[in-house]
Image (cartoon, helix red, strand yellow):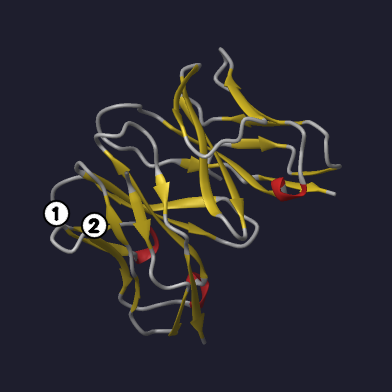
Amino acid sequence: DSGVTQTPKHLITATGQRVTLRCSPRSGDLSVYWYQQSLDQGLQFLIQYYNGEERAKGNILERFSAQQFPDLHSELNLSSLELGDSALYFCASSRLTSGGAPGQYFGPGTRLTVL
Amino acid sequence: AQSVAQPEDQVNVAEGNPLTVKCTYSVSGNPYLFWYVQYPNRGLQFLLKYITGDNLVKGSYGFEAEFNKSQTSFHLKKPSALVSDSALYFCAVRDDNYGQNFVFGPGTRLSVLP
């Protein structure tokens, strides 16, 4: 158990809909990262937050957005869903943002299926 | 820009034999290098990392990795493979000049045959 929790575990929805994925980082971790894992694209970094502020942006679509709240949990919002958005969405957390290079601890993921 | 290559989609090895999963990288600054393992229907688990110092890094479950700066490689190794090592392995790099953006390789599926 990594200490990172993600809800829900599975999500099935229809095209055009909007969903919210939730992540709680390990206790004490200030950084949260979101990744999308699909069969054809591999593991893609989406976005990182550190202590409530956006720190780095990867291959995140404009239809997707995220935020990190004062209690450090994070939400990833996916809107106008398309079939191609079906994937595993992982959240990861780490302790530091600068100096050294901590490993990331991954949650179990949310499997999104868009029908 | 950072990039990571894992040249083999699949590696098959017999139980008890040594295994190697290859990784090469490209960064503009000094690399921070990581290996993660993913078991079916699970998230990624951190195995080991290289930041600085000794080029041979030891990690979890008997794995180790060797950093080779001249070949820009960070191959994962284990002296004696177990069937339970069968999983998907990801190499990742973070450039110390590029903030916190981690780049993951495409993954290598390791199958250890009994």
Split into 4 quadrants, where in the image is the N terminus of chain A? top right
Which subunit holds the residue at mark 2? Answer: B
Mark 1 crowd level (few <14, some 14–19, many ≥20, 10 Å Cα): few
Q: Quadrant of residue B63?
A: bottom left
- Locate residue B32, reporting x and y percent: 27, 45
Residue designated by label 1: B54
Residue designated by label 2: B57
Between B35 and A54, the one lying in front of the other is A54
Between A27 and A97, the one lying in front of the other is A97
* Dot 1 and dot 2 residues touching (CB under 8 Å): yes
The residue at 51%/72% (across/down) is B86
Q: Quadrant of residue A50?
A: top left
Which subunit holds the residue at mark 1? Answer: B
Vertical position of residue B9 compared to residue A83: above or below? below
Q: Amino acid at mark 2?
A: Val
- Residue A101 showing in the rendered view: yes
